[in-house]
Amino acid sequence: MSSSKPNTQPPPRTVSLVTLGCARNEVDSEELAARLEAAGWTLSGGDEASVVLVNTCGFIEAAKQESVSELLDAAGSGAKVVAAGCLAERYGSELAAELPEAQVLSFDDYADIGARLDDVLAGDRRPAHEPRDRRRLLPISPAARAADPGHQPPGHGISDLPAGLAPASGPRTLRRRLSGGPVAPLKIASGCDRRCSFCAIPAFRGAFLSRPPEDLVAEAGWLAGHGVRELVLVSENSTSYGKDLGNPRLLDELLPALAAVPGIDRIRVSYLQPAEVRPGLIEVMASTPGVAPYFDLSFQHASGKVLRAMRRFGDRERFGALLAQVRQACPEAGVRSNFIVGFPGETAADVDELQRFLSEARLDAIGVFGYSDEDGTEAATLTGQLDPAEIARRVDELAGLADELMAQRAADRVGEVVEVLLEEDLGDGDYLGRAAHQAPEVDGTTTVRGVSGAAVGELISARVAEGDGVDLVADWLGVPTAAAGRG
């Protein structure tokens, strides 16, 4: 008669990372991955992992639903499930109560993420955090933050702050790429000090904190050593970079320093606040070799009345003047923006003003989004809420106009010489890539025909031959001299 002993082997310390939302979350996931590896965890595919860590998004309702669906799908795999990221931080114990399938972690858990997953694997259920306004964790004055523990000496990352001060963002080389390719985001700051009435992000991401420029240059070098050729600078508000370090013009100095990093061919800046765009920054972005003349301007609307209700700056005339400055500095500059339609109190006249601005602005990329209430925001309490069906109608109308205008702008570029970063070999000498006015995933692509002697990851010159919506078709001209010299 034989007896068998029960299997007492502990489950493998394997984890699958799922990233939802924006490029800032992508950076957070790569830093979490490096921390987990340093703690002895093995990154694995979803079907093989003992723990699935979902880095959630909590920006708008659709993103929240996607995050919840991903968590439920992960639970169905039989693995233990962990919710981290913005949705987890924003709702904490409430999310844990609604989703008992998942353990819910806070940004405060990131520095000890390996130990937290050890607890999850052992079946220990930690109580989820109670959400709090993270803006209150640092001094109100940006200048006062330099003396706060939130700013560490060079070489230390803000993820190693005392608990609760900011989401993970370092140490600087503590990052593991989770995807390949020649493009990567580089997070230059965390948090936001603005108080837009429709936005909840500052409350759960916290006050604005810049990363020291020396850390960013070092990480850019590390990314270049891992095959990256284009850096996309990301933050909640890139134009605020440096104000908490005592230099509100520090972005003007950072861009040339990053462009000079060996192996980096192109720097792209995302999310510029129009109220903070200065002539000096425009000049640096328009004229610095290696910096894309690409202006991701967060206009949100063009009616002064609606913008004031949003607690934002500007109107159609002011935004038009800003675009004129950009194009005077660089006529071929790329410009994109997003717009919210159906904000409380928005009238037909306000929509007409927005349509007029779009028709005049010659934007390369236009995102149109319908307004929806966000928990804890001022806008959710405003009178004049519009019927969802009317908001959807306005979105459809504006999106149709946007499609026409973007196609026309692409057609205007026919004959223009563009620098294209090659990202995919389509065969027979054709490559898919992006010109300077095309950011990853959101602004269209450029197909280059007849490429010879170049490969994925190289920056080449091409002449635009035709437009197809926001996408371009161009003919190979060669490798730009400047790019060859920087490599």
Image (cartoon, rainbow, N blue to C red):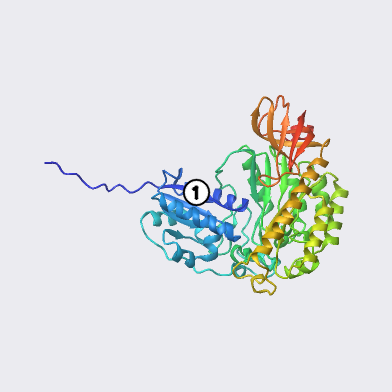
Is residue 96 visible in the rendered image? The answer is: yes
- Secondary structure found at label 1: strand
Q: Identify the residue under disc 1.
A: 17
Q: Position of residue 136 (x, y in %)?
A: 61, 70
Q: Position of residue 39 (x, y in %)?
A: 45, 49
Q: Position of residue 344 (x, y in %)?
A: 70, 69
Q: Quadrant of residue 207?
A: bottom right
Residue drawn at the location 64% of the way across and 30% of the way down: 425
Assign the N terminus to one quadrant of the image.
top left
Q: How many badges with numbers are in the image? A: 1
Residue drawn at the location 42% of the way across and 46% of the way down: 49
Is residue 170 visible in the rendered image? The answer is: no
Residue drawn at the location 66% of the way across and 49% of the way down: 216
- Vertical relation: 193 (above or below) 230: below
Type of amino acid at the residue the image marks with label 1: Leu
Judge left or right: residue 210 versus residue 47. right
Q: Position of residue 210 (x, y in %)?
A: 67, 58
Q: Nearer the viewer, residue 320 or 352?
A: 352
Q: Quadrant of residue 368?
A: bottom right
Q: Residue furthest right?
A: 328
Judge left or right: residue 68 versus residue 212. left
Assign the C terminus to one quadrant of the image.
top right
Judge left or right: residue 148 versus residue 402. left
How packed is label 1: few (under 14 Cα within 10 Å), some, or many (20 or more)? many
Q: Nearer the viewer, residue 411 or 292?
A: 411
Judge left or right: residue 250 versus residue 137. right
